[in-house]
Amino acid sequence: MKNILTRVFVFSLIIAFLASCANDELTPLYGTEKNQPGKVVVIGYSGLSDSIQIMVNKKPIEIEVGKEKRSSFAKKVELDYEFVYHGDEEKTFEITSKTTNQVLRTYHFDAKKTKDTLSFFSEENIWLDKVVSLKPGVLKQPSYNGFRFVFPTFNLYSKTDYNGKLDGIVRRINGQILGVVENINTTEYSDFIEFPYSSPPTIFLDIVKHGTTESYVPGKRVRVNITMSVNKSKLIILQEKEDAAGNFTGVEGTLNLADYFTYK
């Protein structure tokens, strides 16, 4: 009888231990630390040539697509990742290249904010974070159009000695100045500028040093062709361009972040 009781007691201890260790991400561990449910909403777009993976504490996030599980992503990425914070534990999110395993970006989350958002936009030589908080400007009246600008590849090919903020002088094709948009930089969108829509819809943006009319590239006018859209507010990503020899050729402004994300 004593042997039977001993075996039952040992077996119960084993079952209790296994239950406490099961599903490390979703099951709170027993102990004195405070466990809290956590959630990170991932909203992103990857235009990179290679697929990306989203690693949490070195483990890839998997989602179910039909009957299959997927752990790599291309183009638009939208998912809710739920887990448990164990005490003061930190969750480290790494976005990596699937082929090379190169870590492209690293983010840290903890229980001080149990519900959070990770948002990004990536293209070759471009990475923008917190893109869902970079909202388009609000148009004040009908038949207007508006713009904000960001310049993540500033000096990538032009390699100038100027590293300050930039302004953009907005002109019609006849040379008439519509306004000046200020504080264009590499990570945050500029001030908002709006004006009435007109035809033809092409306008010019001359990029200059902040507070001046001087081009940021010595001896070269940097002019970007921009297309207006009636009753639309755009978030334009400016991109320096190069020729086959790697020489700076100018700046393009065709990427509109508002085409990739829904803003509330």
Image (cartoon, rainbow, N blue to C red):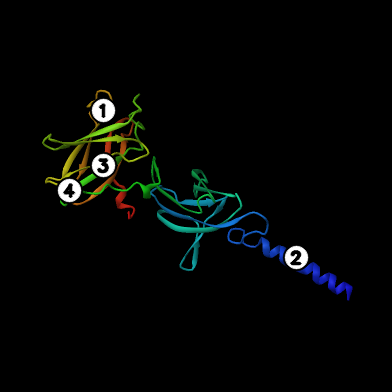
162 up-or-down from 24: above or below: above
Sequence-earlier tag: 2 or 3: 2
Q: Are marks 2 and 3 in contact (CB under 8 Å)?
A: no
Sequence-earlier tag: 3 or 1: 3
Res. 73 in view: no
Res. 158 in view: yes
Numbered disc total: 4
Q: Taking 212 as reference, is 98 left or right?
A: right
CA–CA distance in space, label 4 to label 1: 26 Å
Q: Are marks 2 and 4 in contact (CB under 8 Å)?
A: no
Residue receiving disc 4:
144
Residue receiving disc 3:
192
Q: Residue at x 67, y 62 (%)?
A: 20
Mark seen at residue 211: 1
Q: Residues within 10 Å of mark 4 (few under 14, many from 20)?
A: some
Q: Nearer the viewer, mark 2 or mark 3?
A: 3
Camera-side residue: 7 or 100?
A: 7
Mark seen at residue 14: 2
Q: Where residue 236 sits: x, y (%)? A: 28, 43
Q: Where residue 175 sits: x, y (%)? A: 12, 34
Sequence-earlier tag: 4 or 3: 4
CA–CA distance in space, label 2 to label 3: 63 Å
Q: Amino acid at mark 4?
A: Tyr
Q: Where residue 57 sits: x, y (%)? A: 57, 50
